[in-house]
């Protein structure tokens, strides 16, 4: 870059010298030479002094030495701008346009070409063009702002930038109002309403603003917000601007790109500034921008190591509408060292905390607001169900990661409240995948992990799978068998019409996911010590009934050999009436195990419980 700059200055000086020879007086010798940004102009003092106060002062200060060479340092716009100002001093006609009016305003201020030294001077001509022509046309305002990017801060001091920004905001707001009126129409009932299907033509300026530098773009968007431009239009403009600025780094929007680390190392901070600026401009209204756009910004903010406030703002916005997110959105790559997890689990955890905190705030609201499903302050129960399903799918996706620690896996699973999951099939599937991928887990860690599952909320298919799952700890398998037995007992009890009026207490605990979810978490989880003892007793009773069944089977085979078919059938029916796998007696309405079974097998039950301990 440093090698090319002197070459550009030499070529600029040569071209300016050639252009100067075309319009300068050839019959009058030059008496002053002006140097500007490497370019030299052989001119005459009189035309310059008559229009420029700055040159007049320089010549007056060196009147005794008869100055013949002047260097103008830091002249805005360089040699090109000075050439236009010199032409104006010589009376050479040229056209003022939106492409050069900002330069003319700045160079006229630098050379002091004001009304004080000459009537209708260059400064007043340029100012008049801005006020009467540029500020009435949005495209021209954008073009002038582009020119001002290289003329700051002088263009800002002369209020060129502020006038153009105000004009853009006013024009955009007026365009939207006009577009809204054009979409008004009368319904069949004679009422005036807005036609939502009609295309909105008031946002054509979005593409024009995307050419601005980020700081000027930020000022334009802020002015539009103050003027009342629709949040949807602001969001559409931000998306368009981000697409143009950030897709230059393709990995910002493509997590699978393998060159992301190299891009971060070579980044000069411009992309980071763009992301932080766009986040600061996001509308406060929900759904003003799609949630996948928010996730794209968050992915970029993590990769570019943006400020903590920027990332927390995005996480808060995403958490407030997490129920409409997709699984792919949550899969944010981890941009840290190679030993870390594949996905950024910590960021997802913070998003879930933001979502859950909304749910916690529900208790502080009055009854009227709690039952409003569209309340912006807290998620509805439907939103909780959707997020719970999303989290379970996310856990299943990250579970095979060998570097994923148990603590991180569990903290994601425990973030949502207990009543968020009506069915635990998805959580069981994720835990099973984690156990399969991390076979070196200790028994205590397995027990800790499986405590997350409420086996009462497993479906019949998931319960059958868990009962045969050797990866689960023994205690969990016993719980599954116990609840499956209760489920089967409830089904059998309900099949007897004469026992429908009898309450079956255990069935309330396993009836359905929705019923279990309606119970309080304290009632759902019994003491582990008491539950273990109940399981041990129930297993002992099952073993004794199994022995009774085997004895009856031997007796039935013996009777079959000794009796005729009719006698055998009557004996078989009597024995079946006496036999009940779950302890039901043949008497009407009985639902408890037989007293004889308890009396004769009490010692065996005690021995079984002792052995299980």
Image (cartoon, rainbow, N blue to C red):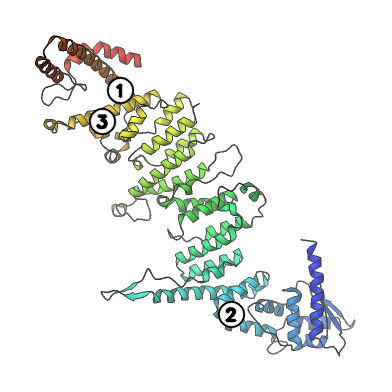
Inter-mark Cα distance, 1 to 2: 84 Å
User: Residue under circle 3?
Assistant: 487
Q: Is residue 15 left or right of residue 415?
A: right
Residue 478 position, x and y percent, is 34, 24
Residue wearing tag 1? 535
Q: Secondary structure at mark 2?
A: helix
Residue at image position (56%, 43%) is 334
Image quadrant occupied by the N terminus: bottom right
Which circle's residue, 2 or 3, is located before the other in the chain?
2
Give how far apart the Cα atoms at labels 3 and 1 are: 14 Å
Q: Which mark is residue 134?
A: 2
Q: Mark 2 and mark 3: span between their CA atoms?
A: 79 Å
Q: Is residue 528 left or right of residue 97?
A: left
Task: Give neighbour class at mark 1: few <14, some 14-19, many 20+ (Cα, 10 Å).
Answer: some
**Is 443 on the left-hand or right-hand side of 613?**
right
Other residues around mark 3 within 10 Å, as few (<14) / some (14–19) / many (≥20): many
Along the viewing direction, whichever of 553 and 529 lies nearer the viewer: 553
Secondary structure beneath dot 1 equals helix
């Amino acid at each position: 870059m440093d090698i090319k700059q002197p070459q550009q200055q030499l070529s600029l000086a040569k071209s300016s010298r050639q252009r100067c020879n075309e319009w300068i007086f050839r019959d009058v010798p030059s008496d002053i030479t002006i140097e500007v940004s490497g370019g030299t102009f052989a001119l005459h003092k009189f035309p310059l002094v008559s229009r420029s106060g700055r040159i007049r002062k320089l010549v007056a200060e060196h009147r005794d030495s008869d100055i013949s060479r002047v260097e103008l340092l830091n002249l805005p716009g360089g040699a090109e701008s000075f050439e236009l100002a010199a032409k104006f001093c010589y009376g050479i006609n040229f056209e003022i346009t939106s492409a050069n009016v900002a330069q003319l305003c700045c160079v006229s201020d630098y050379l002091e070409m004001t009304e004080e030294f000459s009537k209708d001077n260059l400064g007043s001509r340029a100012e008049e063009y801005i006020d009467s022509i540029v500020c009435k046309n949005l495209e021209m305002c954008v073009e002038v702002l582009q020119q001002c990017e290289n003329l700051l801060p002088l263009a800002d001091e002369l209020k060129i930038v502020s006038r153009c920004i105000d004009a853009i905001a006013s024009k955009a707001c007026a365009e939207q109002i006009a577009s809204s009126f054009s979409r008004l129409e009368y319904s069949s009932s004679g009422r005036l309403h807005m036609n939502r299907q009609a295309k909105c033509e008031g946002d054509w300026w979005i593409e024009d603003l995307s050419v601005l530098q980020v700081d000027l773009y930020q000022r334009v968007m802020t002015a539009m917000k103050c003027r009342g431009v629709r949040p949807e239009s602001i969001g559409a403009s931000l998306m368009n601007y981000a697409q143009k600025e950030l897709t230059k780094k393709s990995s910002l929007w493509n997590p699978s790109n393998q060159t992301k680390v190299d891009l971060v190392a070579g980044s000069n901070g411009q992309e980071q500034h763009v992301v932080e600026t766009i986040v600061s401009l996001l509308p406060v209204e929900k759904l003003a921008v799609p949630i996948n756009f928010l996730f794209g910004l968050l992915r970029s903010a993590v990769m570019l190591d943006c400020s903590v406030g920027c990332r927390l703002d995005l996480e808060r916005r995403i958490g407030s509408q997490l129920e409409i997110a997709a699984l792919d959105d949550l899969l944010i790559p981890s941009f840290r060292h190679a030993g870390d997890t594949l996905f950024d689990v910590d960021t997802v955890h913070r998003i879930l905390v933001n979502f859950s905190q909304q749910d916690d705030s529900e208790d502080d609201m009055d009854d009227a607001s709690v039952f409003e499903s569209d309340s912006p302050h807290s998620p509805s129960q439907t939103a909780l169900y959707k997020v719970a399903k999303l989290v379970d799918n996310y856990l299943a996706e990250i579970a095979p990661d060998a570097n994923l620690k148990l603590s991180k896996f569990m903290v994601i699973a425990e973030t949502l409240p207990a009543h968020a999951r009506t069915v635990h099939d998805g959580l069981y599937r994720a835990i099973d995948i984690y156990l399969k991928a991390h076979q070196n887990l200790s028994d205590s860690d397995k027990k800790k992990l499986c405590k997350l599952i409420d086996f009462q909320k497993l479906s019949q298919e998931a319960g059958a799978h868990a009962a045969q799952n050797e990866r689960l700890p023994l205690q969990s398998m016993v719980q599954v068998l116990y609840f499956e037995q209760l489920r089967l007992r409830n089904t059998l009890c309900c099949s007897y019409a004469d026992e429908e009026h009898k309450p079956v207490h255990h069935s309330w605990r396993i009836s359905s996911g929705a019923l279990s979810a309606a119970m309080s978490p304290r009632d759902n989880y019994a003491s582990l010590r008491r539950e273990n003892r109940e399981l041990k007793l129930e297993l002992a009773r099952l073993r004794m009934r199994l022995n009774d069944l085997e004895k009856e089977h031997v007796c039935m085979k013996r009777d079959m050999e000794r009796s005729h078919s009719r006698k055998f059938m009557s004996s078989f029916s009597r024995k079946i009436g006496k036999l009940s796998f779950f302890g039901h007696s043949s008497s009407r309405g009985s639902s408890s195990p037989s007293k004889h079974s308890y009396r004769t097998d009490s010692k065996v039950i005690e021995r079984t419980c002792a052995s299980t301990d």
